[in-house]
Amino acid sequence: MDIVYHLSTCDTCRKILASLPKNDLMLHDIKKQPLTESDVDRMKELAGSYEALFSRKAQLYKSRGLKDQKLSEADYRKLILEHYTFLSRPVFIIDNKIYVGNSAHNVEKVIGALK
């Protein structure tokens, strides 16, 4: 099952989803449906690390002083599970390949995978 983990209130996520070709992606709004441990662990298996899924742009990252700490993989996992804002989004899983984040290059790869 192909899926996209996104935030429906995020303008960037909405813009990216609107730009995609017709598809059968299952939409998972991470604010309305919190991520489960199995969701995050599956993403990690595909991405190679929890750090690869982690967003350093989150306001909580700065306000909690996390940028001044050395975080472990266990810390990244715990934070992503604790609050949706720590997941770099959107996250697409298409044909058991993962695409993390909103860079133009990443979106191009997603569009290619959906064609």
Image (tube, rainbow, N blue to C red):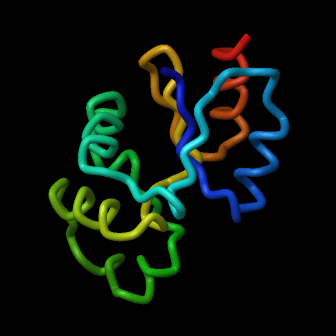
The relative height of residue 52 versus residue 94 in the rendered view (above or below) is: below
How many labels were placed on the picture? 0
Between 81 and 105, which is closer to the camera in this rendering?
A: 81
Q: Which residue does the image show at 76% across and 42% down from the upper left?
A: 16
Residue 31 vertical placement versus 37 (above, below): below
Q: From the top left corner, tell me how far across and down residue 1 is, in percent.
A: 48, 20
Vertical position of residue 114 compared to residue 52: above or below? above
Query: Residue at coordinates 53% horizontally, 21% vertically from top-left?
Result: 94
36 sits to left or right of 92: left
Residue 103 in which image quadrant: top right
Q: Which quarter of the figure is the C terminus placed in? A: top right
Residue 49 x %, y %: 27, 41
* Residue 51 in the figure: left or right of residue 21: left
The outermost residue toward the top is 115
Q: Residue at x 63, y 27 (%)?
A: 25
Q: In the image, is 70 to the left or to the right of 100?
A: left
Q: Position of residue 56 (x, y in %)?
A: 46, 66
Residue 48 position, x and y percent, is 28, 33
Q: Which residue is drawn at the image coordinates 73% and 21% (left, top)?
A: 23
